[in-house]
Image (cartoon, grey):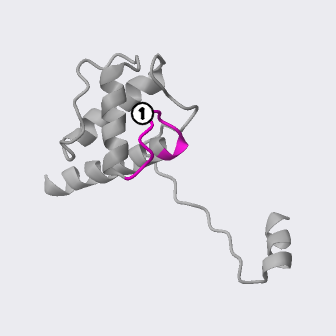
Amino acid sequence: MMLRILRYYYGNEINIYEAETSQEYPYSFTKTLKLGDCSEDVYVLQNALNYIRASYPGIPKISNPSGRFDNATLEAVKAFQKIFSLGETGEVNYQTWYKISYVLIAVKKLAESVY
């Protein structure tokens, strides 16, 4: 139905393609993460940033990931956002979460191709 509406207004040159899903990083965005939050999502975030850090040493290490969004996590998020030209809010919104996911998969594939 939606495609029919789009084609009505924009012509037959409109096509909808589904993005390829990746089972390599199964965590989906649930809500914006910010300073003071404490959850499994924050723990996943902290470990992802520490893994990415091996390829991007400008991201500070988060010692002892605990699932609590502390100042170390805030600084790591801001550094990531700066490196990838995202708004340096220190909050992990939809855009930041999926950029982290994308980069994480890329650095994992790079590491696999080397070894």
Give the magenta part as a residue range: 85-95
Q: Nearer the viewer, residue 81 or 3?
A: 81
Q: How many marks?
A: 1
Q: From the viewer's perspective, tell me whether residue 28 is left or right of residue 88.
A: right
Give the residue drawn at x 48%, y 26%.
34
Q: Residues within 10 Å of mark 1 (few under 14, many from 20)?
A: many
Q: From the viewer's perspective, tell me whether residue 35 is left or right of residue 14.
A: left
Q: Nearer the viewer, residue 10 or 107?
A: 10
Q: From the viewer's perspective, tell me whether residue 37 is left or right of residue 52.
A: right
Percent of width and height locating residue 47: 31, 30
Give the residue drawn at x 85%, y 65%.
1
Q: Secondary structure at mark 1?
A: loop
Secondary structure mainly formed by the magenta segment: loop
* Relative vertical location of residue 37 with respect to residue 12 in this rendering, above or below: above
Give the residue drawn at x 21%, y 46%.
56
Question: Which amino acid lies under the numbered mark 1 shown in the image of this protein?
Answer: Gly
* Relative vertical location of residue 103 with respect to residue 68 in this rendering, above or below: below
Percent of width and height locating residue 46: 34, 28
Give the residue drawn at x 39%, y 23%.
43
Percent of width and height locating residue 18: 61, 62
Q: Which residue is mark 1?
A: 90
State yes or no: residue 44 in magenta. Answer: no
* Relative vertical location of residue 95 with respect to residue 66 in this rendering, above or below: below
